Amino acid sequence: MAINLLLGLQWGDEGKGKIVDVLTRDYDIIARFQGGPNAGHTLIFDGYKHVLHTIPSGIFHKTAVNVVGNGVVIDPVIFKRELDNLSKFEIDFATKLLISRKAHLILPTHRLLDAASETAKGKAKIGSTLKGIGPTYMDKTGRNGLRVGDLEMADWQERYDALTEKHIRMIDFYGVKLEYDLKELQEEFDEGVKRLKELTFIDSEEYLNSALKNGKSILAEGAQGSLLDVDFGTYPFVTSSNTTAAGACTGLGIAPNKIGDVFGIFKAYTTRVGSGPFPTELFDEDGVEMAKVGQEFGATTGRPRRCGWLDLVALKYAVQVNGVTQLMMMKSDVLSGFDTLKICTSYMYKGEEISHFPFNVEPENVRPVYSEFKGWQADLTQMTEKEQLPKNLMDYISFIEKEVEVPIKIVSVGPDRKQTILR
Ligand code: GDP
Ligand code: IMO
Ligand code: MG
């Protein structure tokens, strides 16, 4: 059996949570492979709305097992809150939510370090979600980190204290003023750890590879998006993990030759939250309209998302880096009502027209070149069959498929599980 991947092709918030939830009925296991509580994955069904941060988006289905892989970073405090928020669903977490022993832990002082680093950067700040993601991955690659499996070791407290002390010295080094009560933060952390230890810890690479051998189907759930990848994103305005397909191999312990389909998710337009370049960003009425109709506010931080037209240069780049085999276009309903739509097909880069995503996409170097499309007026949100989709939307879809050379298999027409059209 192969493992399928589902990942975001833009700057995150493409609608990964919704689609994982839709697809879960076809899978035995859903496995998150990177990121942490910087993610906010929204699921809407039966009148409920849930935002998941670390827990995989298959958690609401009766049979699927959800795995938090080794590539994920876990904050026990936020994790406990997520579990508490799901209490009314009577989910048997001990059997349905398994945690990799090799996943790294976000300590309270990682969060403080994130805040200190961002404050020190001033105007050049990344716009981090301040969940401690960067400092935790830095400790991972710096070989100082603490992992879930360390919680079972005799020297846990000693190692925790040593790392915390080191962090406090580093925070002082930044020379910025931070208000915090370490004792309170540690008590909250201990509570979180207590709850985390009630779950089942596993050697996840062993678990997942055995599952594949035994014919189980696995869907790997990405967080963030390809343009936030630490290697391929708009560095340094990125997150600290590999959000692309290769990250699923390292984040789960799955070999590349075990990967089957790669589902790439994108919005019919583009959004970005936080700092960093965004070639097709709009500062006019159209951008305001997208933000309003699309309710573009961060699921984790509530910050307004920046909006702009679809960028095919960036989309092709993401499709290439990930080896995407099927596309899913989200939030098509948000584009209803525009007279004219634009898609960026190339960049003017330092006076030359280029069609690849270059090293630097800062606005002083890059100007998007657009093709225009006729909009559609119909409300898509009640549509359930592909035959109902308006002709101008079908033209928009066909153009993207032709350019990107990958079929669009799902068209999403609203946030609810049911508002999903299969092609
Ligand atoms: P994720 O991080 O990729 O899981 O995406 P988020 O949950 O952060 O952001 C996607 C937002 O769009 C959420 O508020 C979803 O409920 C919403 N959403 C998803 N698909 C659609 C859609 O097709 N149409 C509309 N209008 N909203 C959608
Ligand atoms: P999901 O999984 C959108 C952005 C932040 C910031 C940068 C670095 O919901 O799509 P970090 O906290 O990782 O240090 O922030 O990355 N960012 C996201 N943007 N969706 C996300 O996740 C994001 N996770 C991080 O806004 O610009
Ligand atoms: Mg999100």
Image (cartoon, helix red, strand yellow):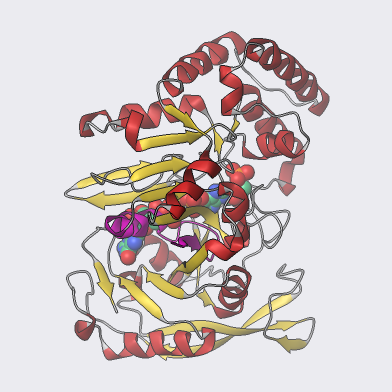
Q: Quadrant of ligand 1?
A: bottom left
* View extreme (right): residue: 173
- Above or below, 295 against 340 in this view is above
Q: Which of the pair 272/253 is nearer the observer?
A: 253
Q: Which of the pair 378/154 is nearer the observer?
A: 154
Say whether residue 328 is left or right of residue 415: right
Q: Which residues are magenta?
A: 1-26
- The quadrant the N terminus occupies is bottom left
Say whether residue 249 is left or right of residue 264: right
Q: Residue 184 placed where, x, y %?
A: 54, 11
Q: Is residue 296 visible?
A: no
Residue at 56 percent across and 41 percent down: it is 129
- The quadrant the C terminus occupies is bottom left
Residue at 56 percent across and 27 percent down: it is 148
- Above or below, 108 against 162 in this view is below
Say whether residue 176 is left or right of residue 285: right
Q: Is residue 338 visible?
A: yes
Q: State the image quarter where residue 167 is shown.
A: top right
* View extreme (front): residue: 214
The reply to whether the magenta stretch includes residue 2 is: yes
Q: Residue 50 placed where, x, y %?
A: 31, 43
Q: Residue 294 placed where, x, y %?
A: 36, 62
Residue at 26 percent across and 51 percent down: it is 44
The reply to whether the magenta stretch includes residue 279 is: no
Q: Which of the pair 74/412 is nearer the observer?
A: 74
Residue at 31 percent across and 50 percent down: it is 43
Q: Residue 93 placed where, x, y %?
A: 33, 31
- Above or below, 137 against 88 in this view is below
- Count of marks placed on residues: 0
Q: Which of the pair 381/204 is nearer the observer?
A: 204
